[in-house]
Image (spheres, rainbow, N blue to C red):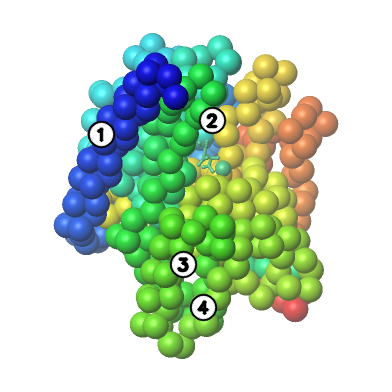
Amino acid sequence: MSEATQSLIEQAKEKFGVILKEQVERVEEMKKGGEPLDYSTLSPVIIGVCFGDGIGEIISKNAQTVLEHTMKDEVAAGKVEFRDIAGLTIENRAKHNAAIPEDVLAELKACHVILKGPTTTPQAGDEWPNIESANVAMRRYLDLFANVRPVKVPEDGIDWTFFRENTEGAYVLGSKGMDVTDDISFDFKVITEQGAERIIRMAFEFAKKNDKKRVTVVTKSNVVKTTDGRFSRVAKRIAQEYPEITCDEWYIDIMTAKLIDPARRADFQVMVMPNLYGDILTDEAAQLQGGVGTAGSANVGNKWSMFEAIHGSAPRMVKEGRAQYADPSSMIRASAMLLRHIGHVEEAEKVEMALEMCGQFEKKIVLTGRDNGATGEELTNYILSWYENPELKARWEEEVAKLK
Ligand code: IPM
Ligand code: MG
C-alpha cells in the first residue's frame, strides 16, 4: 500500500473518531430520558406552521385553513396560538448554507407543535448546494424519534400503523459519509440500544392502547447483522413485557412483497422498523391508499412534535405550472394527527371523517394533479363543508357499514 493511501486511511480513522464521540454523546442525552409534554397543562398551545417550498407552500396553506377553522374558538379563547414560520424555503436554506438556518430553528423551538410543508432536499449535481435535508435535520435537532404513519384502505381491510425510527439508522450520518480514497466511499448506519428501545416501546404501547394483537418488526438482520441484529434483539426483549401481543419479525424484502399480497396484507397491524426501511415501506403503503399525496405523518419527540406529508415538494409540478392541482390531503391528514396529538380528538376525528367522505367514499371532487381535475383549494373548501355538516358522522358511518 502506498504511503499516500496509508495517510488517507489515517485521516478517515480520525474522522471516524469524531463521529464516534458524537454518537456516544447522543446516547448520553438519550439516557437522560424525558417525559412527553402534557399539552393539557399548556395555555396557549403554540402551533408553528412552516410552508416549505414547491407545492409545500400551497398545500400547507390549504391545511392551515382547515386547522385554523377547527381551532377558531380555542384561538379566540387564547388557548391555542398559531405562528407562521418563514425561512424554511430552499432559497433561504441555500443562502445560509444550512439545513435549518439558526434563527428559523429558534422559532421552531419556541413552538410546541409544528405543521410543516414539504421541503426540497438537494442532491449532488442539482441547482442547490448539497445541504442536508431539512426534514432529517429537524428530526435530529428536535429529537423527533418516532415517525408514525397510518395507512388505511377500508375496502381491503387494511388498517396499518407504521412506527419508523426517525433519528438514527442510515440517516443519522447520511451527510457524514466519507470518500476514503478516490475509489472507496463509506456511509454509516447506527442503531443504539436506547434509540431502538424507545421506538419499539412506543409501537407496543400503541398496540396495547388500541387493542391491536400483533406487532411486526421489520429488519434485514440476517444480513445486516450488527445494527439490525440489535434492533431485532431489543424488540424480542421488549415483546416479553407484552405477552398479550404477538411479535413477529419479517425481513424488509419479503415485507415489501407481503404489503401487496391481497391474501396476507390485512393481517398486519402495527409495524416497527429502522429509519430507511420505514421510509421505503411507508411510500409503498401510501400508494395502496391512493398515493403518497394522501398520507400524513407524525414526527413525535418528548419536547416537540412535527406533522407533515410523507412526500416531497414536487418541483416538477411547480415547473409545469400545476402546483394548484396538488392534493392537500396529506397535509390535511397531518393536521388531523396534530389535533389528536394535542388532545383535540373530536376535531381530529371530524377532519378525518370529512377527508374520507371526500377522498374515499363520495369522490365528487377528484384531483388528478392536472387541470382536468379539481384544485387543492376546491377540495379544501369541500372538506370544510363536510366538517361543518351536522350529518357528517352518520353519513360516514353509513359508508363504513357498506364495506362490511
Ligand atoms: C420522508 C421523506 C424524507 C425522508 C426526505 C424528504 C428526506 O422521504 O419523510 O419519508 O427520507 O425521510
Ligand atoms: Mg420518504
Residue 56 marker: 2
Kindly identify the amino acid type of the residue bearing the numbered disc 3.
Answer: Ser
The residue wearing badge 3 is: 232
Q: Label 1, on which residue?
A: 18
Q: Is residue 264 left or right of residue 52?
A: right
Element under disc 1? helix
| Residue 141 locus on image (x, y percent) | 30, 39
Q: Percent from the top left, x then y, of residue 90?
A: 47, 20
**The N terminus sits in image quarter:** top left
Local secondary structure at mark 2:
helix
Residues at marks 1 and 3 touching, judged by CB atoms closer than 8 Å? no
Task: Say which element carries label 4.
Answer: strand
Specify which label sits upstream in the sequence, 2 or 3: 2
Camera sees residue 265 = yes
Asked if labels 4 and 1 touch by Cβ distance under 8 angstroms, the answer is no
Q: Which of these two is toward me, 153 or 19?
A: 19
**Sequence-first disc among 4 and 3:** 3
Q: Amino acid at mark 1?
A: Val
Amino acid type assigned to the residue bearing label 2 in the image:
Gly
